[in-house]
């Protein structure tokens, strides 16, 4: 009789992620972005914070291609900043919804220019 060894399986409900995209500094020239970020400190990056049911690396490419894309990421997105979000992933859907907001608030408080999905 053979016994089947249990493999570590990630819960299907824990497949959501938050992610942060660095935006080109030219996004600061847009009035809507400036208005949303009155506390932005010069020298701090401008970023987009989002959440996804995909791996963040897989989500970034459609953003840039214009598929279910945020305008700022499509036009100004440079790269993912995993050092700002990887520690939180993966998580359940509701956790990702809450973390997207919390991460955006934390980055704003740290002086980042932030746009959220």
Image (tube, grey):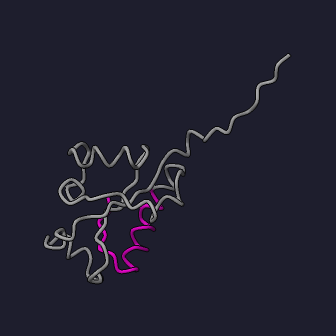
Which residue: 55% across, 42% down? 13
Which residue: 45% across, 68% down? 102
Q: Main secondary structure of the magenta part?
A: helix
Q: Which of the two residues, 113 or 25, is positioned nearer the viewer here?
A: 25
Which residue: 38% across, 48% down? 57
With 8 as the anchor, is 94 left or right in this view? left
Which residue: 51% across, 44% down? 15
Residue 28 locus on image (x, y percent): 18, 73
Q: Quadrant of the N terminus?
A: top right
Q: Which residues are magenta?
A: 97-117
Q: Quadrant of the C terminus?
A: bottom left
Q: Which of the two residues, 111 or 31, is positioned nearer the viewer here?
A: 111
How many numbered discs, if any?
0
Q: In the rendered image of this protein, does residue 73 appear above or below residue 38?
A: above
Residue 88 locus on image (x, y percent): 53, 59
Q: Which of the two residues, 109 or 45, is positioned nearer the viewer here?
A: 45
With 113 as the anchor, is 92 left or right in this view? right
Residue 48 locus on image (x, y percent): 31, 62
Q: Which of the two residues, 59 or 105, is positioned nearer the viewer here?
A: 59
Q: In the rendered image of this protein, does residue 56 appear above or below residue 28?
A: above
Q: In the rendered image of this protein, does residue 53 appear above or below residue 34?
A: above
Would residue 48 be counted in the magenta stretch?
Answer: no
Residue 59 locus on image (x, y percent): 35, 46
Would residue 99 be counted in the magenta stretch?
Answer: yes
Q: Quadrant of residue 44?
A: bottom left
């Amino acid at each position: 009789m053979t016994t089947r060894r249990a493999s570590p399986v990630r819960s299907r409900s824990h497949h959501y992620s938050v992610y942060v995209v660095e935006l080109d500094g030219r996004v600061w020239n847009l009035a809507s972005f400036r208005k949303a970020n009155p506390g932005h400190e010069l020298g701090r990056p401008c970023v987009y914070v989002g959440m996804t049911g995909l791996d963040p690396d897989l989500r970034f490419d459609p953003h840039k291609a214009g598929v279910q894309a945020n305008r700022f990421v499509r036009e100004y997105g440079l790269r993912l900043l995993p050092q700002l979000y990887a520690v939180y992933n993966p998580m359940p859907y509701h956790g990702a919804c809450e973390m997207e907001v919390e991460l955006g608030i934390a980055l704003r408080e740290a002086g980042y220019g932030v746009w959220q999905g």
